[in-house]
Amino acid sequence: MSRADKKFLKVSGLTKSFGTGDTKQDVLKGIDFTVAKGEFCVLLGPSGSGKSTLLNILGGIDSADKGEILIAGDKLSAMNEKGLTNYRRKHLGYVFQMYNLIPNLNVKENIETGAYLSDSPLDIDELLKTLGLYEHRHKLPNQLSGGQQQRVSIGRAIVKNPDLLLCDEPTGALDYTTSKEILQLIEEINQKYGNTIIMVTHNEAIKLMADHVIKLRDGKIRHDDMNTKKITAAELEW
Ligand SMILES: Nc1ncnc2c1ncn2[C@@H]1O[C@H](COP(=O)(O)OP(=O)(O)O)[C@@H](O)[C@H]1O
Ligand SMILES: [Mg+2]
């Protein structure tokens, strides 16, 4: 099957502004791209270029002013509040730079919150092992390192086995070695479970591990390339 046949996400003519009058800021100025099923897509761009805004719109957290998003054949803009809630619950995982864990729940319980109302959650013990957290499953978030906390937040996002995993600067708060470990984990998840991943970063080096690289600057896509010389996360250096 060609890449075009496996089209999973299609974004066309997307625009978004914040504010009105003199303070109006056009953040997304007509965004078009497609992502194939199972693809590992990296979204690059300098700070303030609209990466998080775009991701939040894809995640149904924010809405666009104009344009269309088709995801697995469904139109996101046509969904009502209930449809959007259902979309987020069933099809979407979200990982942020900050882990946003629930402080009084342990590792396993935090991950279980992500499986809530899912039709086909992953086996939690197996997932804990993939995450390297099985030995730590009874610990509270404040007993974990930053990297371990990010592993929990990835577990919470992935436990429902979402079609689409959105990651917004998931290594932004982590040191070099821990960042590479987290990137290896995201790579492993992509390969093992086949989730389509869109990962935002401002670190150019990370594009080498992606199938698809989209570069945003000043609210527009400046590059949209397939990476034919993909390397592993372990091989990355910066
Ligand atoms: N809710 C908001 N209200 C007003 N301005 C916003 C809002 N969210 C983002 N912006 C502005 O939009 C621009 C792009 O922000 P963002 O998407 O967070 O960029 P990035 O993630 O690439 O750093 C910034 O100038 C930011 O100040
Ligand atoms: Mg951002």
Image (tube, rainbow, N blue to C red):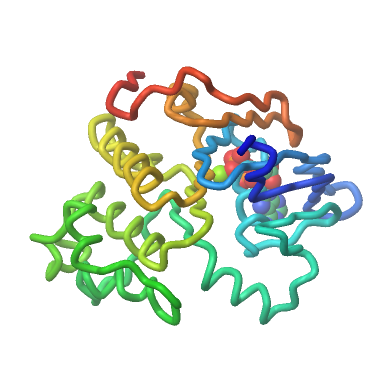
Residue 3 is drawn in which quadrant?
Answer: top right
Q: Residue furthest front?
A: 1
**Which is more toward the observer, 110 or 70?**
70
**Which is more toward the observer, 19 or 114?**
114
In the rendered view, would you say 12 is above or below 47? Answer: below
| Residue sitting at x 86%, y 54% | 66
Q: Is residue 50 left or right of residue 134?
A: right
**Which is more toward the observer, 11 or 146?**
11
Residue 210: percent from the left, percent from the top? 48, 31
Q: Quadrant of ligand 2?
A: top right
Residue 41: percent from the left, percent from the top? 54, 37
| Residue sitting at x 84%, y 45% | 13
Is any part of residue 53 visible from this angle? no
In the rendered view, would you say 174 is above or below 131? Answer: above
Count of picture labels = 0
Q: Is residue 64 left or right of residue 209?
A: right
Q: Is residue 108 left or right of residue 34?
A: left
Residue 132: percent from the left, percent from the top? 17, 52
Residue 91 is drawn in which quadrant?
Answer: bottom right
Is any part of residue 175 visible from this angle? yes
| Residue sitting at x 25%, y 47% | 147
In the rendered view, would you say 19 is above or below 190? Answer: below
Q: Is residue 169 left or right of residue 143?
A: right
| Residue sitting at x 37%, y 43% | 191
Residue 129: percent from the left, percent from the top? 17, 56
The C terminus, quarter of image: top left
